[in-house]
Amino acid sequence: MKHSFIDKYSNLDSPVHRIDPRVKLVAVFSVIVIIVSEAPGAVFPFIFYGAIIALLILVSRIPPAYIMKRCLIAAPFILLAALFYPVSSLIGHGYQAFDINNPEVKAGLTILLKGFMALILLILLTSTEKFHNLLLGLRKLKMPRLLGVISALMYRYVFIIHDEMLRTTRARDCRTPGKLNISRLKVYGNQSAMIFLRSLERSQIIYNSMLSRGFNGEFPGMQGLSLRGTDVIAATVFVLLVLSVRLTNGIVNCYLFN
């Protein structure tokens, strides 16, 4: 069976991959906060944000096509959020057409840019580190233990559901070649029920096997983390680059308006 792992490229060797997951978590979320805090309508600074993120992608060796493919999953939600704000504002003010110089349109564009840049950073985070190491890093950063265990189990069990979906789809195609002569809703409903029943049975078998091997809520495959000074320096430089763009834009805006 073919599965699509969110940490597909975590086995690559690059300077970004070698950074401690705790440092990457703090750096990525700090940068997201800095970018999201950019003033509405300020489009020009995103050129520099994009250049910094593009450089990070180049250093990480993650294929840009893979990142764009991942972005397509959340793209409709970001586009709707970016579109609804200017549309609702323009309708409320009685405007009939879009104008790129309109503050509402610029604000919608910044929403679009903020959403995609935050999404790309999260994709880079999950693509340059194994998922269980990210969970271990979150645990070291004082994430509740129960939440970490639930997340780890969910990540493993979701592939059981996907596996059963592929199996039942193959079985359905073998038994009903060509066009379906009965209600599609009934067929897909029966298939969905079968997927969850078979997944429940397999998950119980897997969990009992884990218990028989001494599972106590901790995953033995998780290795300890080692924090290096170079990791902190690299992450600090990355955050400071983004912060310098944010502060420079704020100073320029204050100077222009005053």
Image (spheres, grey):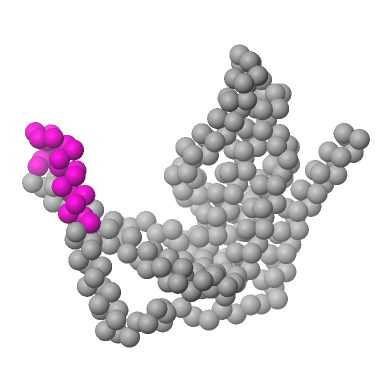
Measured along the vertical axis of the image, is residue 203 above or below residue 87? Answer: below
| Residue 75 lies within the magenta run | no
Farthest residue, direction front:
92
Residue 217, quarter of picture? bottom left
Left or right placement of residue 3 versus residue 231 in this view: left
Residue 187 shown in magenta: yes
Residue 1 visible at all: no
Task: State the extent of the magenta-drawn residues as a range.
Answer: 176-196
Residue 215 in picture, x, y percent from top left? 35, 82
Residue plotted at (51% across, 34% down): 80
- Which residue is more in the foreground, 85 or 105? 85
- In the picture, the quarter occupied by the C terminus is top right
**Residue at figure coordinates x 33%, y 86% from the top left:** 214
The answer to whether residue 215 is above or below residue 61 is: below
Q: Main secondary structure of the magenta part?
A: helix
In the image, residue 2 above or below residue 227? above
Where is residue 14 shown, x and y percent of the image?
A: 57, 65
Place of residue 99 in the rendered image (x, y in percent of width and height, measured from the top left) = 66, 20
Q: Nearer the viewer, residue 198 or 3?
A: 198
Taking the image as shown, residue 76 lies to the left or right of residue 43, namely left
Residue 180 seen in the current view: yes
* Residue depicted at x 19% and y 43%: 188
